[in-house]
Image: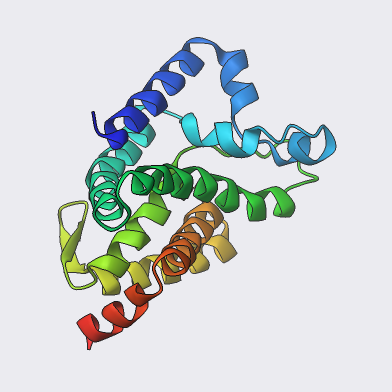
Amino acid sequence: MQVTYILMAVIGLVTYFAWERPELHRRLMLNPYTVVHEKKYYQLITSGFVHNNGIHLLLNLFTLYFFGLAIEQIFYTYFGELGLVLYILLFITAVIVANIPTTIKHKNNYNYNSLGASGGVSALVMAFILFDPIRDLCLYAIICLPGYILGGLFIVYSIIMSKRNTDNINHDAHLFGAIYGVIFTLLLRPSTFSYFIEAIF
């Protein structure tokens, strides 16, 4: 069984069980105040495995399905069995890294919570774009653009929305997850950068 399917199943099951147990749901989500002041560091990871509602869960699993399978195959092609470990490492560490800026930003706000796999998923999307920058990617099956353009727009949009802070979406997690995905991929395979530049020009 491919690792992506296992990851999707784990995320789905943890989310479901957390929905059935509100107290567990509360403990697993990211609350920056308790992370910093009560040292509940595990929330930096567990928050990536719980979701707010069905739509939230399905959107992340849908994206994980397409880009996770692609990155899993790419990593396996380049690194063999080690690539599967690196793939999981990318996702898990991206969830953690994506949550750190939010934790610092809201460390004294007891009422702020964040949850979802978006940080890890954003990292996988950006990693894929580095490997295949000119392939068209579609936003909600409506707007289709080359990956490098859509990725750039996504980063700009995340920065703008993070500054506005007018909705309940953690745009910081999207932004830093995406940036981390780029850094992780380039450190892992530096030649990807030259391929990316050659492909788009």
The residue drawn where x is 28% and y is 58% is: 78
Q: Residue 105, located in which quarter of the rendered image?
A: bottom right
Question: Measured from the top left, where is residue 39 in percent x and y?
Answer: 79, 34
- Residue 198, image x, y percentages: 24, 85
Indicate how the structure is coloured in the image: rainbow
> Is residue 156 depicted above or below 7 in this figure?
below
Which residue is at the front of the view, 17 or 128?
A: 128
Q: Quadrant of the N terminus?
A: top left
Q: Nearer the viewer, residue 109 or 184?
A: 184
Q: Position of 189 compared to 24: left or right?
A: left
Does residue 33 appear left or right of residue 124 in this picture? right
The structure residue drawn at horizontal position 62% and vertical position 39%, both measured from the top left corner, is 44
User: How many numbered marks are there?
Assistant: 0
Horizontal and vertical percent position of residue 179: 48, 65
Using the rendered image of the protein, determine whether residue 49 is visible from the camera's viewpoint: yes
Q: Is residue 195 above or below residue 28?
A: below
On the picture, is 73 further left or further right than 21?
A: left
The residue at 66%/32% (across/down) is 42
Q: Which residue appears farthest toward the right when viewing the image?
A: 37
User: Residue at (29%, 47%) from the top-left corner?
Assistant: 72
Reply above or below: 175 against 18: below
- Of all residues, the one furthest to the top in this rendering is 20
Look at the image and tell me in which quarter the C terminus lies. bottom left
Q: Is residue 62 left or right of residue 160?
A: left
Residue 168 at least partly seen: no
Q: Position of residue 53 (x, y in %)?
A: 41, 28
| 183 versus 56 height, above or below | below
Res. 112 image quadrant: top right
Q: Quadrant of residue 4?
A: top left
